[in-house]
Image: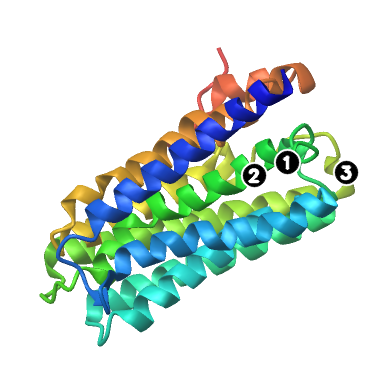
Amino acid sequence: MAERSAAQNLIPIIIAVAVGAAIAWAGSDGGVRYGAIPVFALCGVLAFAINWLAFIPAALTQNEHYYDLTGGISYVTVIIAAVLLSGDLDLRQTLVAAMVLAWSIRLASFLFIRISKAGKDSRFDDIKTRPLQFLLAWTLQGLWVLLTAAAVRAVITGGVRKPLGAVGFAGIAVWAIGFVIEIVADRQKSQFRANPENEGRYIDTGLWAWSRHPNYFGEFTLWWGYYLIAVSAGGWWTVLSPLLMSFLLLRVSGVALLEKDIGERRPRYQEYIERTNAFFPGPPKRAA
């Protein structure tokens, strides 16, 4: 049984690597190369390598504290590598690189501070003592970086040089709106939780009165901004990047995960659900 269990854990790891390899190969066509190696593909390898290296001490100590921080470091490293290996950058490439660096550094530091205060991340309670399952989590984070950063990497390494145009400027505006919403929502929630009087309560003021997950909506918005910028450089095929992020936020690790059993833990949360949109912001509904 143990051998079979190991095989079952290895299969999704192999699939994740295979999907990453396929995306890296497809996205490398016509792009900038470092010697004979496409920079797009090289950045994909780097995304996996960083997470696998970080997995080693995490598995030995059964510690998940640096998981989210490693995700941010992966993004920063991949983007810096893409910039350094792609030669002179135009305005579009420079802006996109600066935008994703600002986003990844802010989010990674925010999540690391949060887990440092909380002491643990409950998502890993059942898997950090099981090496292969724990490895799968780190492998999936590498794949997440590779896939979600595809639009950004395509802009930086694609070799396209042309004006931003209306679509490109629209993408910058959409990204800026999403970035501001995410920052404000995270700050409002952090300030709410810092007040001892709010112990065991949920925030329903500020942006949280208009959406139950405004921080995720901000994240959703900025990734579609990246995609519009990629489209302005001919990267329409990178739509997989914002689609994947949208799916994760809505159906996997975002809204669906957080609200799976929150009604049992906080009975009054149902009232909040009835008057507040789950994701896309809208005016609070009046009580029936």
Q: Indicate which disc residue 135 carries.
A: 2
Picture quarter with the N terminus: top right
Which residue of the protein is positioned furthest toward the top in this rendering? 288
Q: Which residue is drawn at 51% across and 33% down?
A: 12
Mark 3: secondary structure: helix
Q: Which colour scheme is used?
A: rainbow
Which quarter of the picture shows residue 41? bottom left
Picture quarter with the C terminus: top right
| x and y, in percent, of residue 118 in the image | 83, 49
**Looking at numbered disc 2 in the image, what kind of residue is underneath it?**
Leu
Residue 159 lies left or right of residue 285; in this view the side is: left
Q: Say above or below: 123 vs 174.
A: above
- Mark 1 or 3, nearer chain start: 1
Label 3 belongs to which residue? 197
Label 1 belongs to which residue? 131
| x and y, in percent, of residue 80 in the image | 44, 77
Nearest the viewer among 22 and 174 is 22
Q: Say above or below: 79 vs 64.
A: below
- Mark 3 or 2, nearer chain start: 2
* Dot 1 and dot 2 residues touching (CB under 8 Å): yes
